[in-house]
Amino acid sequence: MEPQKFSQKQLIAIGSVFVVIILLGVGYWYVSQRQNEETQQANEETNQALDSLSESLITSETVISNPVEGKLPELNPVEKANPYKEYKNPFE
């Protein structure tokens, strides 16, 4: 069995395919590394924002849950519903 001889065109084509495969592999590696760096940077920024937010929430004064508490007049509709409350029985 004789070794197969490749023509110059075939060698150039095979070499080009190898170069393209290597370039695609390097490109994929570069993009994945860049995305990891961006993800880590975004995670750090998010953690810093959460830390500053939690510090501001811890140090802020307590918020009143009912802002009108104690400012409204006492209005009980049951007391105003009886028109005879002030009526005095003359036979007592």
Image (tube, grey):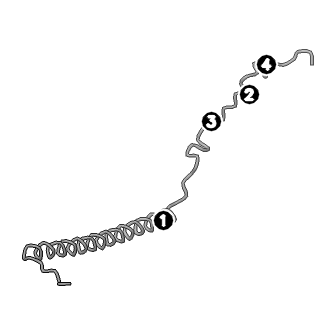
- Which quarter of the image is occupied by the C terminus? top right
Residue drawn at x 58%, y 41% as measured from the top left: 71
Residues under numbered marks 2 and 1 in contact, where contact means CB atoms less than 8 Å apart: no
Dot 1 falls on a residue whose secondary structure is: helix
Q: CA distance from mark 1 to mark 4?
A: 58 Å
Residue drawn at x 71%, y 24% as measured from the top left: 80
Residue drawn at x 31%, y 68% as measured from the top left: 35
Q: Residues within 10 Å of mark 3 (few under 14, many from 20)?
A: few
Q: Mark 1 or mark 3, which is nearer to you?
A: 1
Q: Mark 4 or mark 2, which is nearer to you?
A: 2
Q: Earlier in the sequence, mark 1 or mark 4?
A: 1
Q: Which residue is mark 2?
A: 78
Where residue 45 sits in the image (x, y, percent)?
37, 68
Q: Which mark is residue 73?
A: 3
Q: Residues within 10 Å of mark 4 (few under 14, many from 20)?
A: few
Q: Which mark is residue 84?
A: 4
